[in-house]
Image (cartoon, rainbow, N blue to C red):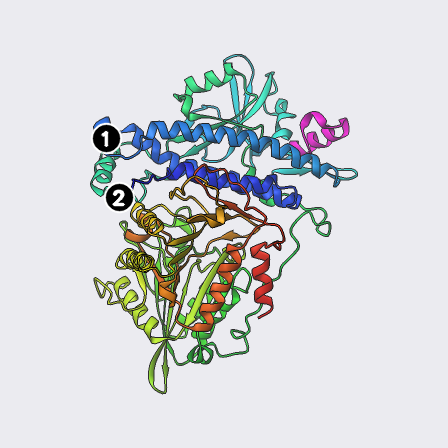
């Protein structure tokens, strides 16, 4: 068996973001949704620079003897990344122009400043006079004065002289509507360019160019770096370095070389720090671009969340679960199901305890209000709040303090390990003593993201599951060091070994001449040990079918004469109106299939460095329902793209006579018919 390669995680991630860009380019996608895909691409890329590029730069900055312990060469990888991003930015610019042209045919105009009429300029001049004080001039022009991720205009007055103005998109709409007929808008920064004389009455400028600084999200090394000793050494080597150093200066491609060189010299930047961009930055603002024709199908037609046949406001959720497990699917069904469960627990006089993990908490939350109500009603509430949920730290800590002040027992995560599991347990007094009711899901307890992320969750009173979950909470409460588990897979305790055993079992089945198959759905596939086990399984005759939304470090063999779906390893990825976020793992097991659902991807951090919980699907009806949904996605031939060795992102081949399957819409119809 020859050694099989692994894809570079960051290069594979860029291939995922390219799939987002391809949705923006898709003429079948409504125009304003295409703009939103550009916004998603832009937002993804910003975070990528803050975290992943930051990491590479940190590794590149330490001494060479330390870097010898690394598998990849950070400098070489960084150059490959920036080359790929330049190619994507070029495509982004063309797609953006195409969308603007198509919007014109719909009567929506996003004008450039040179396209404005005299009356438009007069209107903008009066409008600008009212907001000019918000356009801060950076007098010192030190790089440390720049806010992370904000837009600035560099106004060039000579070869080497310039001024910098802050574009106040935090106080004013990025898109200014012009008066008159039609629906016409201009960018906020163009309004500033047209009126710079109001900011600098005695100065003349050649032109203005947008820039944006991206800074390190943190002094950052992933918690999935496998060589912990090396990580510790690098942390110490970097301990004295200032946090938040720039990882990117994004600049307008029209900026003259003389000005670019001036900025590099003044701010001590090098060529890798300077990233070529379009005329406009922060395209994530297109999430809020106005829709003047809500009835004209410039956006997706509305799909109202479905009610659940069993879990309704009119039923006792506890009585329902004592009879049978229940499965929920977001955003296809109402997130209010979970909110109702918490509220019911808060109001039920027989409920004594509520325990749950909170990874990303919404700023305002019905769920959190119900937890506060439970505390007022005298219930014991135990919460595990993730203090290190990247970019949500402040909000999570704020809510954690609120719960503490109201009497909850709040556990904040320790620095070495994150609580990423999506778990909830209620203890309730009954005729036969205490009964436990559990929820284990793939998505956060967040009503806002539940409208955008495709997730699944299991409600159950099955004692095989609830007794294990009781053990998990005991560990989180620091009452136990290690949980005693019989059914659940819980990281960092038994998830890895259990999955490896399941893979090994399929290998043995294949060697015995039995049908052997592994079907996996996850966000990311990165862990080298798991990938190597999948390689061994494939080479032993196990059929592998994978759905991986994001980056995938497994490299399928190069195409043969077989169709992709007939290959030993067939991987697809789906980008559509919702973000695929579920994790489902299905093993043939000699005809007695096993399926797991939960929070863990197959990344080293999810297997070894986070608290993750996956539940087996024990109820036969629930098993069928979840498998049906999984197989609908495997059949997607409208939005699915093949993940191959070349990262070509080709659409799934449409076989003659095969019906079109757009899986997200098909799942909605499937659930609607239940």
Disc 1 versus disc 2: distance between alpha carbons? 15 Å
Q: Quadrant of the C terminus?
A: bottom right
Using the rendered image of the protein, determine whether residue 331 is visible from the camera's viewpoint: yes
- The chief SS type of the magenta part is helix
Callout 2 crowding tier (Cα within 10 Å): few <14, some 14–19, many ≥20: some
Residue at the extreme right: 181
Which residue carries the number 1 mark?
68
Residue drawn at the location 73% of the way across and 52% of the way down: 295
Sequence-first tag of 1 and 2: 1
Magenta stretch, residue numbers: 109-129
- The stretch drawn in magenta includes residue 122: yes
Quadrant of residue 233 within the rendered picture: top left
Relative image position of residue 515 (x, y in whole percent)? 38, 60
- The stretch drawn in magenta includes residue 607: no
Q: Does residue 128 lie above or below 527 as drawn?
A: above
Q: Report how many numbered discs are placed on residues in the image.
A: 2
Relative image position of residue 372 (x, y in whole percent)? 42, 67
Quadrant of residue 153 within the rendered picture: top right
User: Which mark is on residue 233?
Assistant: none
Q: Does residue 304 lie above or below 153 as drawn?
A: below
Report whether 507 appears left or right of 87.
left
Which residue carries the number 2 mark?
226
Q: Quadrant of the N terminus?
A: top left
Work out whether residue 85 or residue 179 is closer to the camera in this orientation and state it.
Answer: 85
Residue at the extreme front: 513
Callout 1 crowding tier (Cα within 10 Å): few <14, some 14–19, many ≥20: few
Instruction: Give the structural element (helix, strand or loop) at label 2.
Output: loop
Relative image position of residue 639 (x, y in whole percent)? 56, 48
Report whether 289 appears left or right of 476.
right
Work out whether residue 451 or residue 310 is closer to the camera in this orientation and state it.
Answer: 310
Report whether 464 appears left or right of 108.
left
Relative image position of residue 296 (x, y in whole percent)? 73, 49
């Amino acid at each position: 068996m020859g050694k099989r390669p692994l894809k570079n995680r960051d290069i594979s991630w860029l291939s995922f973001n390219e799939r987002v860009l391809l949705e923006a380019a898709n003429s079948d996608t409504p125009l304003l949704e295409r703009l939103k895909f550009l916004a998603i691409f832009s937002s993804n890329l910003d975070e990528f620079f803050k975290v992943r590029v930051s990491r590479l730069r940190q590794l590149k900055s330490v001494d060479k003897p330390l870097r010898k312990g690394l598998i990849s060469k950070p400098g070489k990888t960084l150059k490959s990344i920036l080359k790929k991003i330049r190619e994507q930015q070029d495509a982004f610019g063309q797609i953006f122009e195409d969308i603007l042209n198509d919007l014109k045919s719909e009567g929506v105009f996003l004008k450039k400043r040179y396209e404005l009429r005299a009356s438009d300029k007069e209107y903008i001049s009066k409008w600008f006079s009212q907001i000019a004080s918000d356009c801060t001039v950076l007098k010192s022009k030190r790089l440390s004065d720049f806010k992370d991720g904000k837009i600035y205009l560099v106004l060039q007055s000579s070869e080497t002289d310039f001024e910098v103005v802050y574009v106040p998109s935090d106080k004013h709409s990025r898109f200014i509507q012009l008066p008159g007929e039609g629906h016409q808008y201009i960018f906020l920064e163009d309004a500033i360019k047209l009126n710079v004389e109001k900011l600098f009455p005695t100065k003349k400028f050649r032109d203005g160019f947008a820039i944006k600084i991206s800074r390190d999200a943190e002094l950052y090394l992933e918690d999935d770096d496998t060589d912990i000793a090396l990580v510790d050494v690098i942390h110490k080597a970097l301990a004295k370095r200032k946090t938040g150093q720039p990882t990117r200066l994004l600049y307008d491609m029209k900026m003259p070389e003389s000005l670019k060189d001036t900025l590099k010299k003044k701010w001590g930047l090098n060529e890798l720090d300077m990233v070529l961009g379009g005329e406009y930055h922060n395209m994530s603002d297109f999430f809020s671009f106005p829709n003047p024709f809500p009835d004209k199908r410039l956006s997706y037609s509305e799909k109202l969340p479905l009610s659940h046949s069993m879990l309704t406001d009119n039923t006792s959720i506890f009585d329902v679960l004592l009879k049978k497990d229940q499965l929920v699917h977001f955003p296809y069904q109402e997130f209010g199901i979970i909110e109702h469960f918490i509220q019911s627990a808060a109001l039920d006089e027989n409920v004594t305890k509520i325990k749950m993990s909170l990874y990303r908490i919404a700023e305002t939350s019905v769920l959190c209000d119900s937890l506060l109500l439970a505390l007022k009603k005298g219930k014991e509430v135990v919460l595990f709040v993730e203090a290190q949920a990247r970019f949500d730290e402040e909000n999570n800590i704020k809510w954690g303090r609120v719960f503490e002040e109201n009497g909850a027992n709040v556990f904040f995560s320790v620095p070495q390990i994150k609580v990423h599991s999506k778990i909830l347990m209620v203890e309730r007094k009954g005729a036969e003593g205490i009964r436990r009711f559990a929820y284990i899901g793939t998505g956060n307890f967040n009503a806002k993201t539940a409208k955008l992320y495709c997730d699944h969750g299991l409600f159950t009173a099955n004692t095989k599951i609830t007794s294990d979950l009781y053990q998990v909470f005991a560990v989180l409460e620091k009452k136990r060091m290690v949980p005693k588990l019989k059914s659940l897979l819980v990281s960092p305790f038994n998830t890895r070994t259990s999955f490896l055993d399941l893979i090994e079992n399929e290998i043995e089945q294949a060697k015995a001449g039995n049908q052997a198959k592994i079907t996996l759905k996850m966000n990311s596939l990165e862990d080298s040990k798991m990938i190597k086990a999948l390689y061994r399984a494939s080479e032993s005759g196990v059929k592998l079918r994978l759905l991986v939304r994001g980056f995938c470090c497994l490299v399928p063999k190069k195409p043969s004469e077989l169709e992709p779906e007939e290959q030993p390893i067939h991987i697809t990825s789906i980008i559509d109106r919702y973000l695929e976020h579920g994790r489902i793992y299905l093993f043939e097991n000699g005809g007695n299939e096993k399926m797991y659902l939960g929070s863990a991807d197959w990344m080293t951090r999810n297997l070894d460095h986070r608290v993750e919980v996956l539940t087996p699907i024990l109820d036969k009806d629930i098993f069928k329902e979840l498998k049906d949904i999984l197989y609908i996605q495997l059949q997607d031939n409208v939005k699915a793209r093949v993940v191959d060795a070349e990262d070509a992102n080709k659409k799934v081949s449409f076989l003659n006579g095969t019906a079109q399957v757009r899986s997200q819409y098909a799942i909605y119809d499937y659930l609607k018919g239940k």
